[in-house]
């Protein structure tokens, strides 16, 4: 058997920034440092940071007064900053800058009294944060079918923004419906779906017809990892999302000659290499890296942690 290993894969610049934010905070202020929600959606990363002294919480009321608290890469609603002030916490914002861009777009639309159509999944923490910018005027639209039915108070005053980790193809389908129904729809000046999500999906598409099975290394909570698994399955072969080597099942590979392997934007490379080692135990004799779009983007750390 052969593995075709996608590149790019794994950590994006926003995830690297968020993880380094926690590590720098621990180095500067010592343990514990509190983090609201999982810093990124990957249990391996979270457990590693817990061992270093990070404490993950969902409710800021549980954080001791005067503590440092980091907001995750997914972003938070403005009211969460207000809560941090109320509880006298020192907040450090590790929101991915590309998610911040979506928040700023939502604020601009809200300031003009526009209805905001947010293409995304309502249950995702990133979407919850963006909705919080203008909850009274934001409508979440997840599918093209929902886009056909959505109603707005004034069709001449509508703006659209997008969750950063969606399927590019599905988001385009939703956008096409909205633009057909609402000709005066205002769109962002630049694509909201992040470069890393797009690049990883393109890498999977490039291997259609060349693999017999897809393995996507990522957490079940990771939106972009789930979209990669769905994309692999759309090519007509089995596709599995797994966190690490312990979830690999030997029976998946009966009659398989070529395995496509990629990982979500919050997955550490160590998890990928561990799965590759497991596949070698099951008979893989060749691992070929397949290049996609190179990634050179870097984000600066929050001001409080820059050296």
Image (spheres, rainbow, N blue to C red):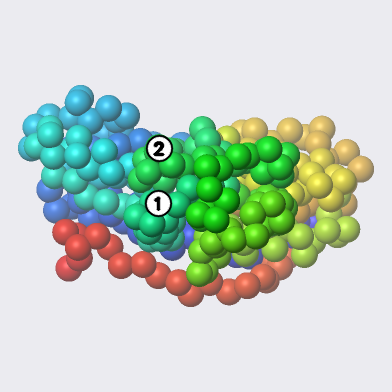
Q: Residue at 37% of width from left, 43% of height from top?
A: 134
- Report the front residue among 165 and 28: 165
- Classify residue 121 by image quadrant: top right
Q: Is residue 32 left or right of residue 39?
A: left
- Report the front residue among 102 and 227: 102
Q: Position of residue 41 (x, y in %)?
A: 47, 41
Q: Disc number at residue 154?
A: none
Q: Is residue 184 visible?
A: yes
Q: Residue at 19% of width from left, 26% of height from top?
A: 61
Q: Disc number at residue 113?
A: 1
Q: Residue at 71% of width from left, 68% of height from top?
A: 290
Q: Residue at 79% of width from left, 44% of height from top?
A: 233
Pointers 2 and 1 in contact (CB under 8 A)?
no
Q: Position of residue 235 (x, y in %)?
A: 84, 50
Q: Position of residue 195 (x, y in %)?
A: 55, 65
Q: Position of residue 38 (x, y in %)?
A: 38, 38
- Report the front residue among 236 and 89: 89
Which badge, 2 or 1, is on the more N-terminal residue?
A: 1
What SS does tag 2 mark? helix
Q: Which residue in the structure is indicated by mark 2?
A: 136
Does 295 appear above or below 246?
below
């Amino acid at each position: 058997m052969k593995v075709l290993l996608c590149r790019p894969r794994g950590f994006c610049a926003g995830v690297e920034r968020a993880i380094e934010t926690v590590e720098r905070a621990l180095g500067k202020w010592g343990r514990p440092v509190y983090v609201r929600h999982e810093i990124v959606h990957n249990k391996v990363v979270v457990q590693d940071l817990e061992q270093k002294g990070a404490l993950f919480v969902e409710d800021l009321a549980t954080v001791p007064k005067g503590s440092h608290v980091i907001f995750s890469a997914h972003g938070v609603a403005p009211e969460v900053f207000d809560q941090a002030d109320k509880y006298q916490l020192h907040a450090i914002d590790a929101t991915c800058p590309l998610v911040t861009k979506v928040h700023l777009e939502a604020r601009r639309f809200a300031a003009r009294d526009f209805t905001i159509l947010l293409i995304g999944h309502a249950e995702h923490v990133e979407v919850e944060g963006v909705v919080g910018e203008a909850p009274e005027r934001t409508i979440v639209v997840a599918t093209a079918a929902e886009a056909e039915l959505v109603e707005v108070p004034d069709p001449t005053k509508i703006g659209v923004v997008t969750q950063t980790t969606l399927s590019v193809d599905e988001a385009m389908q939703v956008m096409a419906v909205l633009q057909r129904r609402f000709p005066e729809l205002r769109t962002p000046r630049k694509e909201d779906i992040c470069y890393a999500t797009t690049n990883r999906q393109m890498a999977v598409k490039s291997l259609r017809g060349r693999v017999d099975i897809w393995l996507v290394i990522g957490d079940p909570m990771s939106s972009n990892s789930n979209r990669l698994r769905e994309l692999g399955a759309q090519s007509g072969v089995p596709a599995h999302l797994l966190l690490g080597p312990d979830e690999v099942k030997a029976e998946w590979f009966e009659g398989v000659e070529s395995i496509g392997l990629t990982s979500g934007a919050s997955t550490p490379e160590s998890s990928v290499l561990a799965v590759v080692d497991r596949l070698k135990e099951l008979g893989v004799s060749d691992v070929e890296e397949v290049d996609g779009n190179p990634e050179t983007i870097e984000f600066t750390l929050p001001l409080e942690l820059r050296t």
